[in-house]
């Protein structure tokens, strides 16, 4: 483990092990939430830790290179391609291959919709559209977790351009960052009352988290001047203590039913910012977050994040009953094993290699081919000809039965999904211009919707809404 740290530190003299340790904390929280949700009901805030860390690192790189007149958009985006594409390409190909042999046409088509969205980094928009009450449960979608990668990449495309233009126009970049963060946070607070699902996946209501990290990169430069040499150690330790409390408490205090991100997301994002601001020398960062184990996990956090969810979904889909603890532990073990292998033999190999611009174009071309193959697979209904005529007939019957079931329930017509606010409920359910003299509303969940076909069959003289 020490050799691993030595190699990383020597490759970058400004390397901060505590930041990789924070990545380790983030991925462990996400992994615990996905595998053992009752043990850490708010572990999904690990994604928010990633957002702050990413915003901080990317902005630090951009700002430093602009200061030294060495910034290049081409070099910046080549670094992002070299960092993200190889591991993601491997995971997308593996998911496609596994789905080819194991998924029925409709499931394979849905998988390829996410492969296409993941290849072009807009999985968050697909997740927003796809997360409905009657859709497949989120824990059966192998690539749903790519939504967070989509938000980060959308930020990486926009933010360098904003910073570069603002610096060249001699604008106050810090004030601009604060203004944009406040706008995004306001959208987050307002949108959560209207559509909680869209608020969770939409970049406009998430960018403020990355912008906290961006603002932190500016503040950290002048932090030393705010603290005298005598008081710096005390100030840093106080900040880091507050940071670790704000970061960890939400993991236990919130859960799936919490209105998130909303106001709740302020705690882990602010806490992460405090921990980074405290610096590598404060006690918590040095003795806890910078431990070899957390740093090593942080180093493999990206491939570990990519690998763990498809493995977990595969076990859930094929388990005939509830998954036993020993199987879940095996999922964790294999996730770490695959994450470690992908890090050492794929991610690190590409990051340390000297690639020409043409090599980066090859990576873009490979990713584009994967995306368009996935799109064609989706458009051709999951390639049903992979199976025998008998299997195709069986799957066609089950898929048509599900669609008929949805129609009988009133989906999408008069069925009101939980994600709709009261305004959408009113406009979707009732025709205000032509009010019915008599109307019946079925109030309840899918069990109440079971009554709809029977009532309609009686052809009673009233409008039916549910």
Image: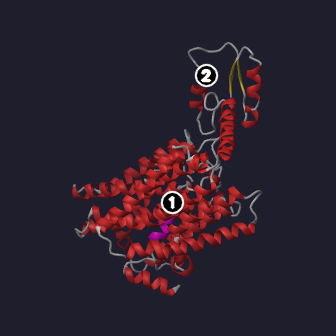
Q: Position of residue 88 (x, y in %)?
A: 47, 63
Q: Report the span colored magenta.
A: 272-277
Q: Which mark is residue 259?
A: none
Residue bearing the label numbered 1: 92
Judged by its main secondary structure, the magenta piece is helix
Q: CA distance from mark 1 to mark 2?
A: 44 Å
Q: Is 230 colored magenta in this rendering?
A: no
Image vertical order of residue 430 relative to residue 156, above or below: above
In the image shown, does 351 or 162 lie closer to the viewer?
Answer: 351
Helix, strand or loop at mark 1:
helix
> Quick check: 442 left or right of 74?
right
Q: Between residues 228 and 390, which one lies in front from this camera angle?
A: 390
Q: Is residue 412 above or below residue 150?
A: above
Q: What residue is drawn where x is 77% and y is 25%? A: 454
The residue identified by callout 2 is 430
Q: Position of residue 240 (x, y in %)?
A: 51, 71
Asked whether, in this view, residue 6 is left or right of residue 456, the answer is: left
Would residue 273 be counted in the magenta stretch? yes
Q: Quadrant of the C terminus?
A: top right
Secondary structure state at the residue bearing disc 2: loop
């Amino acid at each position: 483990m020490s050799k691993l740290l030595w190699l990383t530190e020597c490759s970058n003299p400004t390397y901060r092990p505590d930041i990789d340790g924070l990545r380790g904390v983030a991925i462990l929280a996400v992994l615990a939430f996905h595998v053992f949700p009752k043990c850490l009901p708010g572990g999904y805030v690990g994604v928010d830790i990633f957002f702050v860390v990413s915003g901080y690192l990317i902005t630090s790189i951009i700002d430093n290179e602009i200061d030294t007149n060495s910034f290049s958009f081409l070099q910046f985006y080549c670094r992002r391609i070299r960092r993200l594409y190889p591991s993601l390409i491997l995971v997308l190909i593996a998911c496609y291959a596994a789905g080819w042999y194991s998924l029925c046409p409709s499931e394979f088509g849905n998988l390829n919709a996410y492969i296409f969205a993941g290849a072009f980094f807009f999985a968050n928009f697909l997740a927003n559209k796809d997360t409905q009450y009657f859709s497949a449960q989120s824990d059966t979608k192998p690539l749903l977790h790519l939504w967070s990668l989509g938000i980060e990449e959308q930020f990486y495309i926009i933010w360098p351009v904003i910073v570069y233009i603002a610096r060249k126009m001699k604008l106050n970049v810090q004030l601009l960052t604060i203004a944009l963060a406040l706008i995004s946070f306001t959208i987050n607070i307002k949108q959560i009352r209207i559509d909680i699902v869209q608020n969770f996946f939409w970049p406009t209501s998430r960018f403020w988290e990355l912008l906290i990290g961006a603002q932190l990169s500016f503040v950290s430069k002048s932090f030393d001047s705010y603290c005298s040499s005598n008081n710096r150690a005390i100030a840093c330790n106080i900040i880091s203590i507050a940071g670790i409390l704000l970061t960890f408490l939400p993991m236990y205090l919130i859960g799936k039913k919490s209105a998130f991100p909303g106001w709740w997301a302020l705690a882990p994002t602010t806490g992460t910012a405090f921990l980074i601001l405290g610096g590598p020398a404060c006690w918590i960062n040095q003795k806890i977050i910078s431990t070899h184990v957390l740093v090593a996990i942080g180093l493999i956090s990206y491939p570990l994040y990519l690998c763990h969810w498809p493995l977990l979904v595969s076990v859930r889909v094929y388990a005939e009953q509830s998954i036993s603890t020993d199987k879940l532990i095996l999922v964790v073990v294999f996730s770490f094993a695959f994450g470690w292998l992908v890090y050492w033999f794929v991610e690190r190999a590409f990051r340390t290699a000297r690639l020409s611009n043409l090599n980066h174009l090859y990576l873009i071309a490979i990713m584009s081919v994967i995306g368009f193959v996935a799109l064609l697979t989706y458009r051709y209904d999951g390639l049903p000809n992979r199976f025998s005529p008998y299997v195709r007939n069986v799957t066609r019957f089950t898929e048509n039965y599900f669609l008929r079931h949805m129609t009988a329930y009133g989906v999408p017509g008069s069925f009101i999904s939980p994600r709709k606010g009261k305004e959408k409920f009113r406009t979707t359910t009732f025709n205000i211009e032509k009010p019915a003299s008599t109307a019946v509303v079925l109030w309840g969940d899918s069990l109440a919707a079971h009554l709809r076909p029977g009532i309609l069959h009686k052809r009673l003289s009233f409008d039916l809404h549910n």
